[in-house]
Image: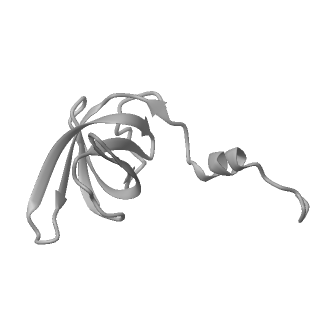
Amino acid sequence: MSFHEVIPPEKKWRERRRGVRVNSRVGVEIVWHDPEGKECRREAITRMVSPYGCLVVLPENLALEQPVQLTNFANSQSAQAMVVWKGPERVEGWELGIALMNTETDFWGLDL
């Protein structure tokens, strides 16, 4: 690529993403600790999954880099994860990108 070559925004976006993403509704439980140390739990449905994590919507406004435990109700697997992206607030809550800390397992039980 030359110094003057312009990369289209849609190509930049694709290059930032890791792995395949699949629109998939998987029931999950998300557990985290609030700033006072109290354990919080919330059930949610994923909107999208990948080998590296998922996109969910929660009524709670979790902070970026908030550690969470994610449990997949379909196969009862649990994993440590972290909030890595936060979208705009919607009527039903905040869109959150959650990354799995260990991507060596088949957490979703899907062919990704």
**Count of marks placed on residues:** 0
Q: Nearer the viewer, residue 29 or 10?
A: 10
- Residue 65: x and y in percent read 35, 65
* Residue ID at (34%, 58%): 82
In the current view of this chain or complex, which residue is farthest to the front? 91
* Residue ID at (11%, 69%): 37
Relative height, residue 93 to residue 38 (above, below)? above
Specify whether 52 is left or right of 14.
left
- Residue 28: x and y in percent read 24, 38
- Residue 12: x and y in percent read 68, 51
* Quarter of the N terminus within the rendering: bottom right
Which quarter of the picture shows residue 86?
Answer: bottom left
The way the protein has been coloured in the rendering is one colour
In the current view of this chain or complex, which residue is farthest to the left? 38
Q: Nearer the viewer, residue 42 or 93?
A: 93
Specify whether 11 is left or right of 81.
right
* Residue ID at (28%, 62%): 67
* Residue ID at (39%, 43%): 54
Q: Nearer the viewer, residue 12 or 28?
A: 12
- Residue 69: x and y in percent read 23, 53
Relative height, residue 46 to residue 98 (above, below)? above
Q: Nearer the viewer, residue 93 or 13?
A: 93
